[in-house]
Image: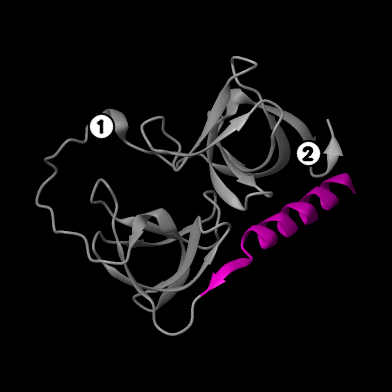
Amino acid sequence: MKRKWLSLIALVMIAVLCTPVIALGGTNIFYVDTANKKSLNMRSDCTMGDNIIANIPYRAEVTVFEFLAGDAWARVEYNGRTGFVMSRYLSGTRPASGGGSGGGSSSSTTISYKGFTPTNYTAAVRPSNPSGYVNMRWAPSKSTSVHEVYYAGETLQVIADNGTWCQVYDTSRNICGFMMKQFLTILSVGGEES
């Protein structure tokens, strides 16, 4: 019975996180603009653990219907398929075509979204220094820009986890990002205290 309730709560959390924040009217064209010039994964829902249903090439044109989960995700159409992509990889202008893999990026800064599984728990931020802070980043890598900073005791919803990084959602600020799991302490799972 407890497992059924946890499953139900997880589904409700996903539905809440995917509730439109901004609904766009008319045709809204955006372009895939990934830093590594690789394709962008289109997923079946707006969490990292969901199925990849298409790969959208760099510079490809997509139609955006709405932004979700604090603008972290967008519901898009590409080649007749509708799904969800991370909105930080969309641009209002077509990016410059880049030949080859030259440039300043190295394999040590590769960002991987593999291994994330959906979760549903509340966690408190726990900096290594009690008077310090923890960075919420745009992607699960220390090389990505900081989205927001959090201090000891602030709470976040953890919606996906790969063992090292957590995809977190701040319900009070309505923003989503990534934080290293070592800086989080589980408070409750599915609404039950741990």
Crowd around label 2: few <14 · some 14–19 · many ≥20 (10 Å)? some
In the picture, measured across the screen, residue 45 lies left or right of residue 27, that is: right
In the picture, measured across the screen, residue 64 lies left or right of residue 66, that is: left
Q: Position of residue 52 (x, y in %)?
A: 45, 57
Quarter where residue 168 is shown: top right
Q: Where is residue 125 in the image (x, y as percent from the top left)?
A: 66, 29
Q: Does the magenta stretch include residue 8?
A: yes
Outermost right residue? 1
Outermost bottom residue? 26
Magenta span: 1-23
Q: Which mark is residue 189?
A: 2
Q: Does the magenta stretch include residue 70?
A: no
| Closer-to-camera residue (5/1) | 5
Q: Where is residue 48 in the image (x, y as percent from the top left)?
A: 52, 49
In the picture, measured across the screen, residue 32 lies left or right of residue 171, that is: left
Crowd around label 1: few <14 · some 14–19 · many ≥20 (10 Å)? few
Characterize the magenta stretch by its predominant secondary structure: helix
Task: Look at mark 1 in the image and give the residue it sits on.
Answer: 107
Residue 105 sits above or below residue 59 on the image: above
- Going by the numbered disc 2, the residue's amino acid type is Val
| Closer-to-camera residue (41/188) | 188
Quarter where residue 107 is shown: top left
Q: Residue 96 carries which label?
A: none
Q: Distance between the residues labelled 2 and 1?
A: 36 Å
In the picture, measured across the screen, residue 57 lies left or right of residue 159, that is: left
Residue at 38 percent across and 77 percent down: it is: 28
If you read the primary sequence from the N terminus, does the residue marked by circle 2 or circle 1 appear first? 1
